[in-house]
Image: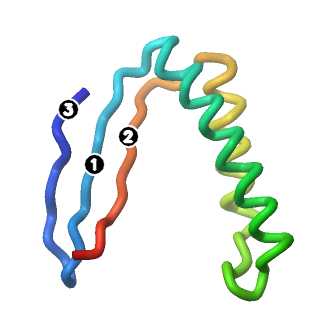
Amino acid sequence: MTAPERDQRDRTSTETIELPATAATQRALHEAIGHLYDELAATGNVDAVEAGHVPDEVFEGIEDLYVGSAEESIASVEIRYELIE
C-alpha cells in the first residue's frame, strides 16, 4: 500500500491510495462493493429527490468491479477521493 498523495484544488484535498491486488484485497473489495451497490440502489429508490439520481453508468461500473473482484482478475486497485477542508 502506498501513502496518500495530496493535491490542493479549490479548498479540497485529493487523496489516492493504491492497494495491492492480492486475493485478500479482492475478496474484501468484492464484499464492500456489494454493500455499496445495495446502499446506492436503496438510496436512489427511497431518497431520489434528496440524494439525486445515480446514473446507470455508475451501477454498470460497480457491477464490473464486483464481478472482477469475485473472479480475482483485478490487476490494480486505486481509490481516489476528495476531502472538503
What residue is disc 2 on? Answer: 78
Query: Which quadrant of the view contains residue 70?
Result: top right
For residue 52, above or below residue 13: below
- Viewer-proximal residue, 47 or 11? 47
Residue at the spot of label 1: 16
- Per the image, the residue denoted by label 3 is 2
Which one is earlier in the sequence, the residue at label 2 or at label 1?
A: 1
**Disc 2 and disc 3: Cα gap in Å?**
10 Å
Please name the colour scheme applied to the rendered image: rainbow
- Assess disc 1: are there few (<14), some (14-19) or many (≥20) residues with their C-alpha within 10 Å of its C-alpha: some
Crowd band around label 2 with a 10 angstrom C-alpha radius: few (<14), some (14–19), many (20+): few
The amino acid at mark 3 is: Thr
Farthest residue to the top: give it: 23
Name which residue lies at 55% across and 30% down: 29
Q: Where is residue 52 in the image (x, y as percent from the top left)?
A: 69, 81
Note whether 64 is above or below 83 in the view shown.
Answer: above
Q: In this view, does 13 lie above or below 24?
A: below
Q: Is residue 26 left or right of residue 20?
A: right
x then y, percent, for residue 74: 53, 25
Three-letter code, disc 1: Thr
The image quadrant where one finds the N terminus is top left
Q: Which residue is drawn at 65% across and 48% down?
A: 36
- Residue type marked 2: Glu
**Spatial separation of the CA atoms under disc 2 and disc 1:** 7 Å
Q: Earlier in the sequence, mark 1 or mark 3?
A: 3
Task: Find out whether the residues at labels 2 and 3 contact each other: C-beta distance under 8 Å.
Answer: no
C-alpha span from label 1 to label 3:
9 Å
